[in-house]
Amino acid sequence: MVTMHDQSPLRAETWPMPRTCPFSPPPDYVGLREHPGLPRLTGPSGRTVFVAARHEDVRAVLGDARFSSDRSHPDFPWMRVGETVFPGFRPSLVEMDPPEHGPARRAVAGELARRVRDLRPKVQHIVDGLLDDVLAGAVPADLVSALAVPMSGLVLCELLGIPASDRQEFTANTTVLTAHDAADADRAESFRSLIAYFDALCATKMTERPEDLLGGLAGHQLFSGGEGRWAMVELCMLLVVAGLETTATTTALGVLALLEHPDQLALLTADPGLTPAAVEELMRFFSVAELSLIRRATADVEIGGTLVRAGEGVAALAAAANRDPAVFADPDTFDVTRDNRRHLAFGWGPHQCLGKNLARLELRIVLDTLFRRIPTLRLATPRDELRYVNGSAFSVSALPVTW
């Protein structure tokens, strides 16, 4: 039976909905998941969307090409007040729809996969260097500012082939751009600086064709000429906005989860072969990013017994789906031995996260190396006294540790 629009929408005062515990999704997610069909929800912007919260429904929405990701459409269901596209915006990979999306994604995915495979020794070198500094520095140390954030930034520098002489200014700009407490004017200035920097960098890569991600993409037809260079700039910004914060915050939250679950940490340190499974469990358990999982129906579609009409929006809640008891046994239990092949932390379907294997590589190396080199690591501040941020990605602002 198809459910029509016969229920009054719920209202969310903030978006994403706030978490009250770092180890749990927003409390309202349980009710949204158990609601018959797709409930409706009105966001802070005043826009009303359907909500997909069950694992089956989230996969159905994200895997169906009749749901558009194009944020430049005048009816895109922005959920937050003031959200809009930048002047001169052209859809990047995460906002493209067919038929343009397929060829562009395949070009980037193939080149990215090849470069990520070559990054392992460089990521290990970066993590070792940062931990050298942590061990030589003051105690307690903040693993957010001393490890998680710089690791993500330096790995991106390696991936994009950013010269060593430019990295200090680059990381300063990316830190401001992704900081939750940065002033709007400072964030806008960092955005402009990064655009200008990437424009010059991509022009150089297109001329010199070095052996890195951008040099490899420069040989592809989609990234040739003036429009191709701008597409390359947009890809660089996408990697900054979508990749830096999520990897850094999952790193910090992952360390927190392991320190607060000593039985699971003991399993991991006794058997480092569990590290890949532990990383997948951390992705499922936290599911830190959901802003990109908003879609607009381009045709009438039935999802979970509810008819979503063309033009209407749907918010797919990966964090709710990843706690669905129909898919995950004891879903609220943190278990590093869990089989997590069905988690949706990287999304699903044609827009599944392009950088998922890079994130996995970073997390595996940093967790394995951290607890091997500092086996007595412990929190310097009680968990309840840490400050958490409900932003575009749920995060902990600082993680003081000692040993």
Image (spheres, rainbow, N blue to C red):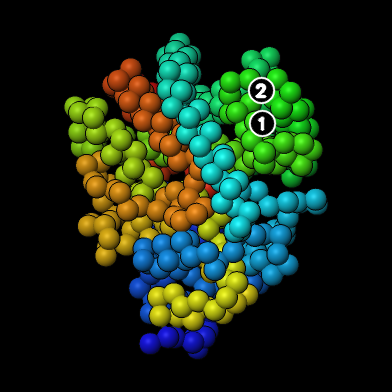
Query: What crowding class fits label 2: few (fewer than 14 Cα within 10 Å), some (14-19), or many (20 or more)?
Result: some
Q: Image point 29% across, 48% down: which residue? A: 340
The residue to which callout 2 is attached is 209
From this view, report whether residue 250 is shown above or below residue 147: below
Please say whether residue 44 is visible from this viewpoint.
Answer: no
Q: Quadrant of the C terminus?
A: top left
Inspect the image, locate mark 2, and give the three-letter code of the amino acid beneath it: Arg
Specify which label sits upstream in the sequence, 1 or 2. 2
**Vertically, is 24 above or below 253?**
below
> Is 163 or 369 nearer to us in this picture?
163
Left or right: residue 332 compared with residue 362: left
Q: Secondary structure at mark 2?
A: loop
Q: Position of residue 191 (x, y in %)?
A: 73, 38
Q: Which residue is mark 1?
A: 218
Locate residue 198, reporting x and y percent: 72, 31
Three-letter residue code for mark 1: Ala
**Are dots 1 and 2 in contact, CB under 8 Å?**
yes
Q: Secondary structure at mark 1?
A: loop
Query: Where residue 155 appears, x then y in whole percent?
Result: 53, 26
Question: Where residue 41 sits: x, y (%)?
Answer: 54, 73
Above or below, 110 against 153 in this view is below
- Report whether residue 279 is seen: yes
Residue under the image location 58 percent in, 20 percent down? 211
Q: How many marks?
A: 2
Q: Residue at x 71, y 27 (%)?
A: 206
Spatial CA distance of label 1 from label 2 is 7 Å
